[in-house]
Image (cartoon, rainbow, N blue to C red):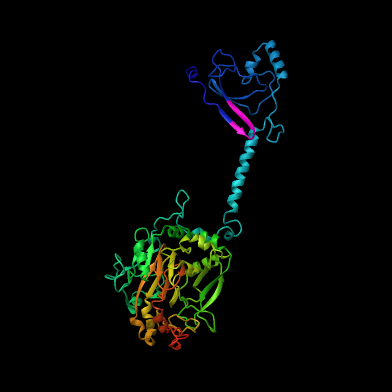
């Protein structure tokens, strides 16, 4: 003990609870020294009434104000044997001092006198309350409490979303690793384009549609080959923007990737709960389901557009689905064949403008689709809203053309596009303008056995490309496209004006669009697939 006198006492500990502060004091009593002397200064402790609990640690003692006893005449920190050793006169003086300066009772936070002997009890009850609250919160948010779907559906918990922000909370616009969504076939040997300069003559390179379908049938589900007939240039937004603009001015299709704002959205949309907050858990949207046996329907996974007019048995049917409803259909579809009826659904929603009451948030969420002069818009003032289509594995959107420029953004999953230049529109055998599915091909591309009625179709020049998360696809006016969902995927597109360079040939090859040509009836209306077709 003497060896530690020079080092002084350990630090003074202070504890606060509400407005009451209690100080725990270390004291040292040297041999022969006066009682209550402090280890560092040797001063006598203040003569407060009431004893103090002492935790003896050799010659050092630790004192706390809890459980004070009203020992009349005691010096703070003085033990009973030491008190008894004092003379009667000293005890009388101490009693008189205690009567003149009685210790004020401690008060609670509300001002009422506190129980001097209740410190340990209060602390024990407080800890018990904290434990009970923790168990209660854990029980409420566990699956054992009521219906787990009311808190969070299993499918949302099972998702593994990508981090959408950096450590500082800013949106993460870094390049995406597209391989996370599955393999992308490489281009056929000698088929990849030269994208170093302006579009070269014959861009994009093409192959007969029969070879493309033989290599990769649209009804193959999520299977992908090692190679495909990819003929489009793919530009990095950060380093090749000028080249992309040059292709756009030439009205040639191309892909664009590594757009920071797009990368951030793709990361956010990989989390189903993010879209759940945007779309609402129960808000109903006008979606589509295939109608096998309907007019110009080629299977349960095939979706042929219809305007809904003058068709008693349309190829698709409209259904009302919420975001959670569609996610449930996706999970159910994983255990069903793509050819099973009612196993595939198209989730759709659109925003006509930023003031759209239901989906106007899209314009803020997708800043690159705000109508401004940039690579995404040739004519910003001619924008026709934002349209989103979420597909399930194996869904096929039949071939057609659109009468305006199209910029297509891929946010999630993989989507395959088989593309045909408008100059080859006549080889598509499009349905007439007055048909409910007008400007769509009446050929079942997935069934080569049924092509005998369309002699020009097998040799039609075409090429293909796969959109992966973070990709944009620019399609000029009238560029024909056939869409296959390789897996569950999210896509939105916007349009901006039109180019009339190929209007004449498209009108001549689409019955009803040319004044010089009468509409011809389709040859395969309501056609069915032959028995044994996959």
Position of 10 with respect to 415 (left or right) is right
Position of 451 with respect to 19 (left or right) is left
Is residue 396 placed above or below 112 in the rendered structure? below
Is residue 378 placed above or below 77 in the rendered structure? below
Q: Position of residue 384 (x, y in %)?
A: 49, 70
Residue 356: name its quadrant: bottom right
Q: Position of residue 482 (x, y in %)?
A: 41, 75
The residue segment tinted magenta is 15-24
Residue 63: name its quadrant: top right
Residue at x-position 40% and y-position 67%: 473
| Residue 17 magenta-highlighted | yes
Placement of the C terminus among the 4 image quadrants: bottom left
Is residue 138 placed above or below 493 in the rendered structure? above
Residue at x-position 46% and y-position 68%: 493
Residue extending farthest to the left is 190
Q: Could you tell me if residue 184 is visible in this image?
A: no
Q: Could you tell me if residue 58 is visible in this image?
A: yes
Prevailing SS of the magenta stretch = strand
Q: Position of residue 331 (x, y in %)?
A: 50, 66
Residue at x-position 53% and y-position 68%: 352
Residue 12: name its quadrant: top right
Q: Position of residue 59 (x, y in %)?
A: 54, 20
How many numbered marks appear?
0
Residue in the foreground of this view, choosing between 503 and 429: 503
Position of 338 with respect to 47 (left or right) is left
Residue in the foreground of this view, choosing between 102 and 467: 467
| Residue 236 magenta-highlighted | no
């Amino acid at each position: 003990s003497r060896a530690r006198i020079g080092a002084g006492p350990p630090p003074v500990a202070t504890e606060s609870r509400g407005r009451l502060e209690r100080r725990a004091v270390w004291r040292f009593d040297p041999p022969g020294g006066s009682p209550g002397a402090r280890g560092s200064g040797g001063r006598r402790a203040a003569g407060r009434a009431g004893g103090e609990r002492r935790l003896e640690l050799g010659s050092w003692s630790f004192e706390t104000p809890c459980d004070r006893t009203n020992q009349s005449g005691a010096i703070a920190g003085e033990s009973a044997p030491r008190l008894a050793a004092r003379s009667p006169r000293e005890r009388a003086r101490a009693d008189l001092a205690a009567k003149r300066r009685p210790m004020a009772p401690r008060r609670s936070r509300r001002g009422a006198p506190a129980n001097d002997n209740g410190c340990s009890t209060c602390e024990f009850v407080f800890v018990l309350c904290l434990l009970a609250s923790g168990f209660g919160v854990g029980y409420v948010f566990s699956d054992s409490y009521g219906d787990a779907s009311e808190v969070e559906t299993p499918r949302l918990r099972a998702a593994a979303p990508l981090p959408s922000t950096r450590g500082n909370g800013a949106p993460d616009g870094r390049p995406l690793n597209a391989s996370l969504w599955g393999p992308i076939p490489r281009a056929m040997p000698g088929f990849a384009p030269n994208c170093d300069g302006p579009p070269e003559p014959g861009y994009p390179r093409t192959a007969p549609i029969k070879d493309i379908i033989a290599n990769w049938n649209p009804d193959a589900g999520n299977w992908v080959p090692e190679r495909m007939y990819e003929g489009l240039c793919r530009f990095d937004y950060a380093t090749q923007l000028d080249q992309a603009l040059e292709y756009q001015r030439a009205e040639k299709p191309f892909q664009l990737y590594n757009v920071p704002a797009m990368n951030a959205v793709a990361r956010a949309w990989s989390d189903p709960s993010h879209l759940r907050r945007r779309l609402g858990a129960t808000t109903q949207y006008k979606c589509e389901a295939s109608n096998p046996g309907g007019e110009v329907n080629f299977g349960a996974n095939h979706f042929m557009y219809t305007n809904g007019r003058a068709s008693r048995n349309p190829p698709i049917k409209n259904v009302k689905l919420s975001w959670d409803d569609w996610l449930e259909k996706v999970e159910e579809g994983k255990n069903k064949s793509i050819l099973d009826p009612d196993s595939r659904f198209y989730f759709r929603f659109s925003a006509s403008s930023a003031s759209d009451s239901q989906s106007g948030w899209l314009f803020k969420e997708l800043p690159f689709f705000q109508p401004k002069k940039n690579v995404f818009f040739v004519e910003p003032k001619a924008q026709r809203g934002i349209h989103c289509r979420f597909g399930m594995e194996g869904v096929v959107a039949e071939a057609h053309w659109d009468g305006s420029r199209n910029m297509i953004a891929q946010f999630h999953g993989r989507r395959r596009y088989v593309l045909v230049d408008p100059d080859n529109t006549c080889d598509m055998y499009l349905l007439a303008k007055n048909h409910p599915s007008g400007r769509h091909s009446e050929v079942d591309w997935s069934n080569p056995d049924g092509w005998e009625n369309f002699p020009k179709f097998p040799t039609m020049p075409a090429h293909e490309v796969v959109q992966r998360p973070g990709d944009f696809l620019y399609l000029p006016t009238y560029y024909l496209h056939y869409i296959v969902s390789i897996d569950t995927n999210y896509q939105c597109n916007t349009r901006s004006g039109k180019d009339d360079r190929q209007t004449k040939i498209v009108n001549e090859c689409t019955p009803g669009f040319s004044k010089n040509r009468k509409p011809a009836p389709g040859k395969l209306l309501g056609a069915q697939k032959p028995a044994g077709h996959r």
